[in-house]
Amino acid sequence: MADNSKSFSTGDFLPLSDADRSHLDSEKITAPSQTFLQDSWRRLRHNKAAMICLVILIILFILSFGSHFFQTHNPNATNPDLANLPPKIPGLDINGFNGTLMQSGERINAYAQAHAHAGTYYILGTDYLGRDLFSRILFGTRISLTIALVASFFDLAFGVVYGIISGWLGGWVDTLMQRIIEIILSIPNLVVMVLLIVVLKPGMSAIIIAIAITSWINMARLVRAQTLELKNQEFILAARTLGESSFKIAFKHLLPNLSSVIIINLMFTIPTAIFFEAFLSYIGIGVSAPQASLGTLISDGQKNFQFLPYQMWYPAIVLSIIMIAFNILGDGLRDAFDPKSNRK
Amino acid sequence: MENSKNILEVRNLKINFNTYAGKVQAIRDVSFDLQKGETLAIVGESGSGKSVTTRSIMGLNAPNADIAGGTIMFKDQDLLKKTRKQMDEIRGRDIAEIFQDPMTSLDPTMKIGKQIAEPLVIHKGMKREKAMAQALEMMKLVGIENAEKRINDYPHQFSGGMRQRIVIAIALVNYPEILIADEPTTALDVTIQAQILDLMKELQTKTNTSIIFITHDLGVVAGMADRVAVMYAGKIVEYGTVDEIFYNPKHPYTWGLLNSMPTMDTSGTELPSIPGTPPDLLNPPKGDAFAARNKYALKIDTEQEPPFFKVSDTHYAATWLLDPHAPKVTPPDQIIERQKHFAKLTHETIHSNRGKHIEEEEQL
Amino acid sequence: MAKYLAKRIFYIILTLFIVTTVTFFLMKFMPGTPLTNQAKLSPSQIHQIYKQYGLDKPLWQQYLSYLAGVVHGNFGTSFQFSDQPVSYLIGSRLGPSLTIGGEAMVVGVIIGIIVGSIGAVKQDTWVDTATTIISILGVSIPSFVLAVLLQYYLGLKLRLFPIADWGGFMYTVLPTLALAASPFAETARFMRTEMVDVLSSDYIELAKAKGLNKVGIIYHHALRNSLIPIVTIVGPLAVNIMTGSMVVENIFSIPGIGEQFVKSILTNDYPTIMGLAIVYCAMLCVVLLITDILYGLIDPRIRINK
Ligand SMILES: Nc1ncnc2c1ncn2[C@@H]1O[C@H](COP(=O)(O)OP(=O)(O)OP(=O)(O)O)[C@@H](O)[C@H]1O
Ligand SMILES: [Mg+2]
């Protein structure tokens, strides 16, 4: 705290030249300035669990949608002679994966007993009609992920548009639109879905319509809330006074600022939609036989659970993994977009 | 500078924050004293480290804070060496704090009487009735009308100014020796601001509490503080009595702050704010951190940090401009005006009745 | 308050009216009839049965009489059990569903609150990670998988609880556990977020500045402030439980409305489907009303007088 004036060369005490100054300034600018999205992506990359889930989901997408190219069997081809075979993986001689089975206290070779050809392998076994479980699970996964895409689409197409219109227009339009949402909210989703499916006859299209009608509500509410907030911010007001069209404002200014809300909420719509498809298929009003859905596979497997537990375990595990992956990724995205929130 | 009147002595405090991006050097060697009964104002732009400094006095730094060095002596004991439990005992009894935003600093679901009584229960083990009676006294003291009735109200039933009074009541209910006020009026209307500041001054004379008053608004400081420390980028760059800082500032950063302060003369014209932004504390620049924004920067500023130069016994500034080798620079006009005023002040040696002149300043 | 209640009840009635109307007309488009073996019946017999169900009248009359019936709690006669009124069918099955549903809600929410607060208080430690993993599993594993696993391992293998049927508390344990997973996990996640938010709020900072220790801060300030918003998720949780009960009751053969709903769907028993749809909506409306009122009562900031 004392003054310690040492002596320096007088040159040091010349005023800073413009050249030196610009050097100083340039030094300052090198500090990385990242856009919001880049910043969020960086935070997401640091989240190991979320990244693992992202990778798992990408793999599942590739596997299930590319399954035509490497599925070992036709998922819907029945083969009653080879029904209920346990998993058998080439070159793996571990109980549970070598085609053997416990029967009345003895380990027997189920494949030999069914007189299967020497080169027959069902890596996850077969179901009660002799259909290859692995191929069926891949097909079921494809349905689940298709539902995920469809639900996302409707969330964006209905939910976001509804929310923006409601929030942006305000006034009586907003009030009316909110009343409608309130009423829909007090009807359990399940009831709406069941009624629709009963009317439309079970099947993929009925499920898609049912999910389309029920999935967008939350998105609409959150987008509306955010729009209300953004509406009065300076950059939007400026755009308005400059006379930009509402449409242009919505696309150029509003959407980018809504992106984090939209992405986060999307990640929570998806597992819900996947769950409902599996649920409806499980109770028997989802995708129709012989097509496989993870829900029907679990329902079928459950009947044999005591004796052939793998028939339920594998589809159940795959379904759970999909749900877990979307949930963790959703949490990760929320953290990444909203660094303030300490949510795990 | 060891002084028996000092109630708090902060020495060479260094605090870093560990973050994703790296180590944020938020406090880079800060030292100051607080004397019994005085008000020390710490001013500086946002991010200069004012709150971090006071938080470390309270022992309430964020979990990612790393105290890299220094001591904070309070009654011959280093607060930085205390355990969490010991700090719990000191907080709210010997050192209390008022926060910036009265709208959010009260528990929305607890009656305010209970909130005011809480420090009494915690530190004095007082019974409920007695504590509530004392809380009521305190409410009257801070000017809450109809206190008997309002003691059972919830925070949302009070205006911002009233809530800040309640926060002050909470802070002072144990008559602490040090009160830290971290921008206590920033969130309030101008008229309410004045009332709260008056209240604080009034209570200070009654309780003889020392106050550390944090603000980035020099305008508030004049009527409030005895001494002022100016902070920039995690360092104190100039400190002195209120007159010295206001009328004889030596650091170009202080000049900038004073220039951007509204007075009668400047009203109507654009206020010259300090151009540029504070440096990135992830890797602070070599030399004087203010150099890049400093119109008067010297070559040496980019190479070596300036030490403190003594201006008077109470006034020090860390700028190379005070070095004997430095060229003479002409400060901004407004500062020259101020220095003239200061010359007059010292000439009349009126340190003793400073208050009068402060009032003049306010009327200017 | 009275005005608020009146308004809310008006909206509930409006909702139920819309649901009744929509379901009525949806079901009218359905090709199915109460007659499963129409071919074997003579025209006069068919006419007789149509008359019994009131299907011979014009549509608008059918609608009005259905509406009038619903107001009086009469949902017509089941197609599946042709001698049973739907209201009786539902009434006799409501008990078991409310029992396990209520149990699941209470158990799930309470454990969720405890686990969520522990996670928040021990934020960023292994405890937090563990509670987070448990709650992620809870929201992700479908109730029908969990129910089967519980039934098999706790019921069949360990013989701790009966594996199916209805009759006393022990029979409710497994279905309650299966149903409670979702409300537990949702509550735990919600509670953790709320509590973490509260713990980083200014008034907790002030409580620390008062010298309150960690336990005191949590007990006196953090807990109450993070508990209050839990009330707002009870409605959505009730929906989860209703959904789950459909499969869980089925798996454990519990004579409840969820099981009946599935059966009715599979047998195209339209009157019962309609009746249950209306009952589910009514239950949700009541839960939402109660939770809103409760929220107003326990949060001093909200006064219901609008
Ligand atoms: N927990 C933390 N983690 C990382 N950096 C932090 C943390 N807390 C504070 N900082 C950094 O420390 C620096 C000083 O912050 P501080 O809050 O003390 O500023 P301040 O002077 O009080 O500003 P204001 O006037 O805005 O309150 C800032 O650059 C801030 O970003
Ligand atoms: Mg601050």
Image (cartoon, rainbow, N blue to C red):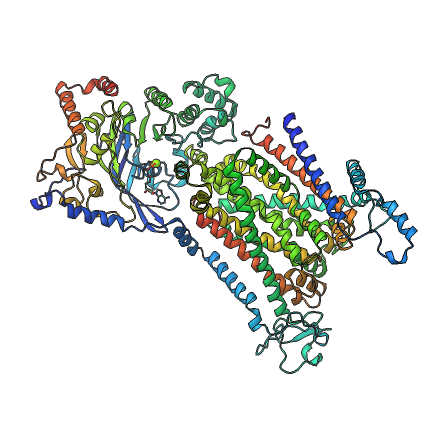
Image quarter where the N terminus of chain C lies is top right
Say whether residue C24 is left or right of residue B229: right
Residue at (68% x, 32% y) in the render: C10
Task: Judge by depth and name the residue closer to the eye, A120 or C176.
Answer: A120
- Residue A44: x %, y % from top left: 44, 54
Residue B340, horizontal then vertical, whole percent: 14, 24
Q: Nearer the viewer, residue A44 or C20?
A: C20
The reply, left or right, for residue B166 in relation to residue B333 is right
Residue B291, given in percent of the width and then of the height, sits at: 20, 42
Tell me the quarter of the picture where residue A143 sits.
bottom right
| Horizontal side of residue C290 vs B89, given as left or right | right
Query: Position of C302 compared to B59: left or right?
Result: right
Camera-nearest residue between B21 and A60 = A60
Is residue C190 something that shows in the picture? no
For the residue pair B300 and B118, the one nearer the viewer reads as B300
Give percent across and percent down for residue B350.
Answer: 17, 18
State how many labels appear: 0
Q: From the image, which quarter does the C terminus of chain C lie in?
A: top right
- From the viewer's perspective, is residue B117 above or below residue A215? above
